[in-house]
Amino acid sequence: EKVEYIFLIVFTIEAFLKIVAYGFLFHPDAYLRNCWNILDFIIVFVGLFTVALETINLIDGVETPVGGKGAGFDVKALRAFRVLRPLRLVSGVPSLQVVLNAIIKAMVPLLHIALLVLFMIIIYAIIGLELFKCKMHRTCFYSGTDIVASGNEKPAPCALGGQGRDCPLNGTECKSGWPGPNNGITHFDNFGFAMLTVYQCITMEGWTDVLYWVNDAIGNEWPWIYFVSLILLGSFFVLNLVLGVLSGEFTKEREKAKSRGEFQKLRERQQLEEDLRGYLDWITHAEVMDLDQEHREGLLPLEDQGSETESLYEVEGINRFMLFFRHGRRWNRWFRRKCRLWVKSSLFYWLVILVVFLNTMAIATEHHNQSDGLTNVQDTANKVLLSLFTAEMLLKMYALGFQSYFISLFNRFDCFVVCTGIIELILVEINIMAPLGISVLRCIRLLRIFKITKYWTSLSNLVASLLNSVRSIASLLLLLFLFIIIFSLLGMQVFGGKYNFEDMEVRRSTFDNFPQALISVFQILTGEDWNSVMYNGIMAYGGPTFPGMLVCIYFIILFVCGNYILLNVFLAIAVDNLAEAESLTSAQREKTEERKRRKMDM
């Protein structure tokens, strides 16, 4: 609490100084005319308002709840939004600018898709309300008691007749009075709960449980039609439109950024040509002036004497050494030329592929509790194959030269793998890595399999296109990390210490500390069992009643913004780069066909 007060004082001083410097509202560049400053001002104002409420409660003798929730409401969670301030770097990071612009430009079509999804959820919620209302509150009770007879399983709905589930235990009966599945959260009794249940089914998390509960309550003849159509229309079709929208907008923004970059390069090239032209004019003018001066002053006579170098070449031993050196350089150039032709030949390519395949087979033979003989054979194979890869690297370095060799990213990768393998072998031989058992660095040998991408044109183009998108992916990861931090801090403020229930069951997905909150938020983003975390949050605030049901807003916003928007941008980037790789491959294929056509014409 004291640390939060310190930060509140710092933020207040910052806001005060900016208001004094820029003005508050009516000046052209006033403080509140900047969106980020508005966010800061709201955070500071809410923090000061919270402190004022706590002070009033203290003066009136009202005890402030644990955790500093003055007046029963914790507004300090809004301070978590200050982590959005690093997004000001968007103007200086072009790749982050492309990602954010694509998301912002996609908001209008995404809003249309959201309205379509909302309309479909409303339709299916109304249908579910009419079909399954009050059907999921019967379960098996011990006869004459209000004790649920579930045995070792969780209670489930039952039916009084028809094709529904019967009570299997003796001395039990099916009767109403049960809140329903998930402590009365999952049902179709009213419009709100029906919409929440339909939305959960659209996310494809736990929809089979809802289907089986409905089957238990009314039979399995026709409810599958409702749920299968909901999944096909809602999850497979409508929600996947988000990917198409984001992919299209990302492609447009990338093309705009590329055109701006090309225009900037063109302007720089024109400026460089103008500077070079002026420099050449100045050089020409200086040479003319220098020639005029030489004609006026005359040229100095040359002495008819041999140079010192010529006198040295007259020595017999020097002549023989220089002749031997020239022959050596000639033979070296000839041998390097032959090696260059050899390393670029198809035979050398297939030999490398064969060695990579043998290396893969040698690694694949490792298994648990293998014999000592097999281990010795694998170690020997590792040394032989590493020697072959080393010979390949040295031969390429000699044939191409160091500068030409390291221009290629694949050659840099090969050099890294070979050098790492040599270091690993040395460390194992001198018993430095003996306590680790199987060397961890030995796993890097698996990367040699990717050497095949160098000779597979389409795969090589795809890898190159993906490498070109690293900046966009890194910017998206930064944006995703900020998003996770914000919702983790909000989750800590809202649900911290709340997931402690009377059943004494340990909940792993909690918000009790920051690392666990990060894991819980990331779990919700992936869609894995996110509804269980939401159910626990609802029960932590009193169950399926008025204050508790507001908790679902946090989880729905987190799941929609994180899973359907941010994570789909990864797929949009991948789709865009796949299209770019295909266009590059088709262009190379057209060039190859053009060369063949020219050879045939000749």
Image: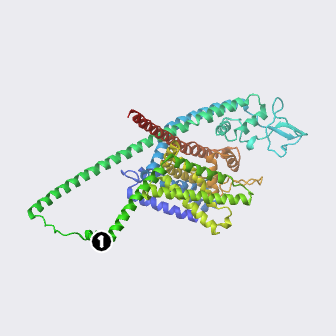
Residue closest to the eye, 296 or 315: 315
Task: Say few, some or many: other residues with alpha carbon within 10 Å of mark 1 (under 14 / 14 to 19 / 20 or more).
Answer: few
Q: How many numbered marks are there?
A: 1
Q: Residue at x 68, y 67 (%)?
A: 435
- Image location of residue 523, percent across then percent down: 64, 49
**Residue at the extreme front:** 316
Residue closest to the eye, 247 or 431: 431
Q: Which quadrant holds the C terminus? A: top left
- Image location of residue 370, percent across then percent down: 74, 57
Residue closest to the eye, 575 or 356: 356
- Image location of residue 355, percent across then percent down: 59, 52
Compared with residue 28, is residue 193 higher up or lower down, i.e. above or below? above
Compared with residue 116, is residue 7 higher up or lower down, i.e. above or below? below
**Direction from residue 43 to residue 601 in the image, left or right:** left
Q: Which quadrant holds the N terminus? A: bottom right
As helix, strand or loop, the secondary structure at mark 1 comes to loop
- Image location of residue 499, percent across then percent down: 70, 53
Question: What colour-coding does the image apply?
Answer: rainbow
Instruction: Report whether residue 48 is seen.
Output: no
**Direction from residue 395 to residue 57 in the image, left or right:** right
| Residue for badge 1 | 315
Residue 74: name its quadrant. bottom right
Instruction: Report whether residue 411 is seen.
Output: yes
**Residue at the extreme right:** 171
**Residue at the extreme left:** 296
Check disc 1 and give the amino acid type. Answer: Val
**Direction from residue 322 to residue 592 in the image, left or right:** right
Residue closest to the eye, 154 or 133: 154
